[in-house]
Image (cartoon, rainbow, N blue to C red):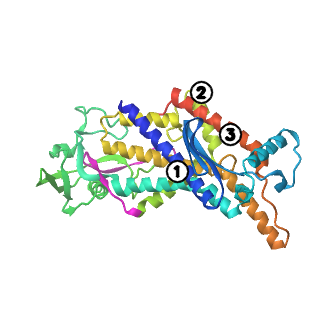
Amino acid sequence: MEYLVGVLVLVVGVLVSIALHEVGHMVPAKRFGVRVSHYMVGFGPTLWSRVRGETEYGLKAIPLGGFVRLVGMYPPAEAVGNPQPRGFFGRVAADAREVSAAEIRPGEDARAFYRLSAPKKLVVMLGGPFMNLLIALVLFTVLLSGIGVPTPSTTLESISQCVIPVSEDASRACTDDDTPAPAAAAGLQPGDRVVSFDGVAVDGWTELQTQIRASGGEEVDLVLERDGERVTTEITSIVAERALLDDEGAVVLDDDGEPRTTQVGFLGMTPADELVRQPITAAVPFVADATWRTFGVVATLPVHVGNLVESTFGTQPRDEQGLIGVVGLGRFAGEIADDDSRSLLEQVQYFLSFVAGLNIALFAFNLIPLLPLDGGHVVGALWEGARRQVARLRGLPRPGPFDTARLVPLAYGVFVLLAGMGLLLVYADLFKPITLG
């Protein structure tokens, strides 16, 4: 039951994100006078709909997208010089113009989308993606500033009984040949909170770790808080080979991607994480970094799809940082909800991060400059605006609207490619899934 609840929660999050994306298109379109005939969440057969004013609002059976129908998306033939359809692609463009023109009611040509100025078209078409970006910003603000970020603390979660060489499995059992760990020998216990090390008060794990690593072979006074009381003990760290860390506490890798090692002081204790709330402004750079990395994935999408094909039908495992579809995300959601080892707060964090990350992906993906994605309409509006500005500067007559219907055949091709990628992701998520660690 918990697994199903997790999947349903994710589905609701996806539907809300899609619905708000379409609101981002609909609101400015109506504000600029464009008639919006349909607002639909999902595709396929209509499950429910209701007409309010001049717009039919509804929910469809397949929750994998949504749309708003803006009347007059493509300029009619007379507005673009009455081009004669030539060949298959020409007929497809002509059909698109006719269908778009048929939606315009008598006397409402001024309310057609194609009549908008280029800046207004940009606002309408960018409204959806930027709504997704806003959703991500709000959710990450809740995660970072409302709930907090899991951060290693000076409270101890576990104590190692021995010193296991860095080249061996850290989870293996201790043997008689292993050197006893100083923390265990000094009687440290899980739940102890380190107050000071060698007479210096410590405020965080990174500070304490730096002091321990610099004290190899030295005996120091360690002050702990245990069950509300202060306990002082003497402890001597041993010198052991451990991973080299940078100034931020991250492991330094060599040219082969393997951790570099160095000789440092070692006690054998692991910190417990605690939630630390970040400043309210922390979400902005976080979302900016995540968005930039997502753009990097989108820019190299063919490479990622190729890698997905190789791993799906080959022997190598799926790339955990690679593409994942809605089926994979649903599996993650179900596994998290069904995991009794995670607290309710941890599960909420996972779900919020999933939905926030999905909205960043929707933002970046929809800006691909190809129809039928929003980015294709953005490019059309930019080209139309540029032509008009050049004509104005040269004192030429104002050009008519850009004939976006000519790009409809390309849109069909892009749609087929996207559908194929979606089916590939479904197959990969079903038969060669990425699993949570």
Does any portion of residue 254 appear in the rendered image?
A: no
> Quick one: SS at disc 3?
helix
Q: Amino acid at mark 2?
A: Phe
Identify residue for label 3.
415
Upstream in sequence: badge 2 or badge 3: 2
Q: Residues within 10 Å of mark 1 (few under 14, many from 20)?
A: many
Q: Residues within 10 Å of mark 2 (few under 14, many from 20)?
A: few
Nearer the observer: mark 2 or 3; the answer is: 3
Q: Residue at x 43, y 35 (%)?
A: 7
Q: Is residue 11 left or right of residue 223?
A: right
Q: Residue at x 48, y 53 (%)?
A: 135
Viewer-proximal residue among 370 and 296: 370
Q: Residue at x 78, y 47 (%)?
A: 97
Residue 31 shown in magenta: no
> Quick one: SS at disc 1?
helix
Percent x, y for residue 89? 82, 41
Image label count: 3
Q: Residues within 10 Å of mark 3 (few under 14, many from 20)?
A: some
Percent x, y for residue 168? 36, 36
For residue 313, which numbered disc appears in the image?
2
What is the C-alpha distance between the residues marked 2 and 3? 24 Å
Identify residue for label 1.
20
Residue 275 shown in magenta: yes
What is the C-alpha distance between the residues marked 2 and 1? 37 Å
Q: Are marks 2 and 1 in contact (CB under 8 Å)?
A: no
Q: Residue at x 84, y 38 (%)?
A: 88
Percent x, y for residue 213? 30, 54
